[in-house]
Amino acid sequence: MIGSIRPEHGDRVQLIRRPDNSYDSNAIEIWWRDARFQLGHIPRREASELAPLLDDGANARGYIWTGGDGDAWSAQVVVFNDDIPTGWRVRSVDEAAQELDS
């Protein structure tokens, strides 16, 4: 594939639990276009709260908020579910990337 891929605002993404991930047992992958392209992961802090809900059968839905510029950490995803903790705050992908770098 030549070039970069850029999802658009409103595109549906699939949230796939990966409890066998060697780096994070709460890992949740983000896939786009019927699971043909992996965009990344839910940030670790949010995944630690969302993973148990998904494991219990919650039906969380994810949508692209901004498609980014095609580079790593540039897309933003919005997750919808009635059981998402009310204490969650909106944070940018840049904040999540900085957390990983620290």
Image (cartoon, grey):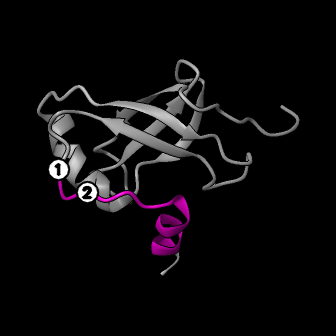
Task: Inspect the image, locate mark 2, and give the three-letter code of the amino acid beneath it.
Answer: Trp
Between 7 and 4, the residue placed more toward the observer is: 7
Magenta residue span: 86-100
Q: Could you tell me how far apart the alpha carbons at marks 1 and 2 are, in whole angstroms?
A: 6 Å
Out of 36 and 65, give the one closest to the viewer.
65
Q: Quadrant of the N terminus?
A: top right
Left or right position of 61 against 34? left
Label total for image: 2
Whether residue 18 is visible here, answered yes or no, is yes
Is residue 25 visible in this depiction of the protein? no
Instruction: Please check the rendered image and state whether residue 97 is part of the magenta-colored stretch, yes or no.
Output: yes
Q: Amino acid at mark 1?
A: Pro
Residue 88 marker:
2
Which residue sits furthest right?
2
- Classify residue 9 as left or right of residue 89: right
Q: Residues within 10 Å of mark 1 (few under 14, many from 20)?
A: few
Q: Which residue is mark 1?
A: 85
